Amino acid sequence: MEKQFVLMITLGALALSATMGAFGQTTQQGIAPKSFEGNLPGGDLQVCYDLMNLGLIKEVTGDMIGVKVDPPINFSNGVSTTLSADGKYLDWTSAAGIMVLGFVIKGGPAYNVYDYVGKNFNWDKGLASPPLVKTKSIPQISHYNFCYLKVGTQGCTPGYWRNHYDRWSGYSAVQTFDQVFGVQFFGTQVTLGQAISSPQTYGTFAFHAVAALLNAAGGVPNLDLTKVNYKYTEAEVIGIVQDAVTSGGTEAAKSLLATANEAGCPLSGTPACSSKNPTACVPQ
């Protein structure tokens, strides 16, 4: 049930006449839901489409998985869910490499949407449907949907990035390595372009560090908006490099980043650097 989507979610921009207001239960992780009357009709992957159409998720690229569950069944496959004994509350946990994006909790005449995009939580507790209007009591959960993403499954090699400069995003070849990573490693004005173009001169640690940063930034997307779904964020890559420089553990860090950089590149559709395609060549 996996398919690639780009979901555009913005809770603040939600404008539905059926909105009931945010009087659902805040979770232990501090997520306050948005409440709506009626049903979110989709099941399984359809929940991802519904979240997209309602404008509930920010920019996310990857292999989305959508699930619908009817209690008293719990779910356990990357994401594990558990219902309370009275059937009114739901707790969830996620395994390594799983990013939960949203939950829809239905009970009574309404449902709550919990937005987890960008939170990187691996658990939460106390999800519930909206309270009943007359009694203010929480009804039992009749069904719930959730959407999640498998992360850290892609990475383009340094060789790709040094031959596809036109796919760089967020960084330029003329920026210096030490400044971008916040380190004193070279002590000279070695640029990102030089580090990724000449590993024989500047070393394979810097070679893979630059590639890792470009992977974390995602790259210029394909026509179908696919970007690199990398294991680490930009901040995490910078942190790995800083720790390695400080501790002298550059060889271990290089191996760590090299493994991630060789996970498989999803970027395609543009020719490599050549005399006929100079825009793909890294400027020196």
Image (cartoon, helix red, strand yellow):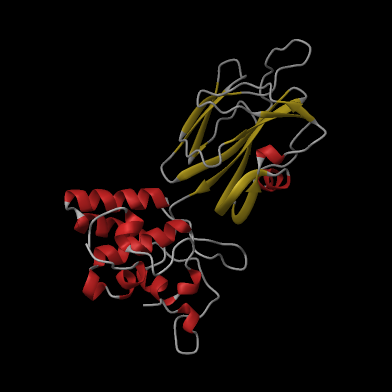
Residue 3: image quadrant is bottom right
180 and 205: which is toward the camera: 180
Horizontal and vertical percent for residue 20? 76, 26
From this viewpoint, which residue is outermost toward the right? Answer: 17
Horizontal and vertical percent for residue 73? 59, 29
From this viewpoint, which residue is outermost toward the bottom? Answer: 275
Q: Is residue 283 depicted above or below 2 in this figure?
A: below
Q: Which residue lies at the image location 39% right of the left edge and 48% below the top edge?
A: 235
Position of 227 with respect to 274 (left or right) is right
- For the C terminus, the quadrant is bottom left
Q: Is residue 87 depicted above or below 239 in this figure?
A: above
From this viewpoint, which residue is outermost toward the top? Answer: 135
Residue 155: image quadrant is bottom left
From this viewpoint, which residue is outermost toward the left? Answer: 248
Q: Which residue lies at the image location 47% right of the left edge and 39% below the top edge?
A: 120
Q: Is residue 197 depicted above or below 215 in this figure?
A: below
Residue 31: image quadrant is top right
Q: Is residue 156 depicted above or below 8 in this figure?
A: below
Residue 276 makes an appearance in the image: yes
Residue 232 makes an appearance in the image: no
Horizontal and vertical percent for residue 274? 44, 86
Position of 247 with respect to 164 (left or right) is left
Horizontal and vertical percent for residue 250? 21, 57
Position of 58 with respect to 187 (left or right) is right
186 and 158: which is toward the camera: 186
4 and 175: which is toward the camera: 175
Position of 17 with respect to 153 (left or right) is right
Number of numbered callouts drawn? 0
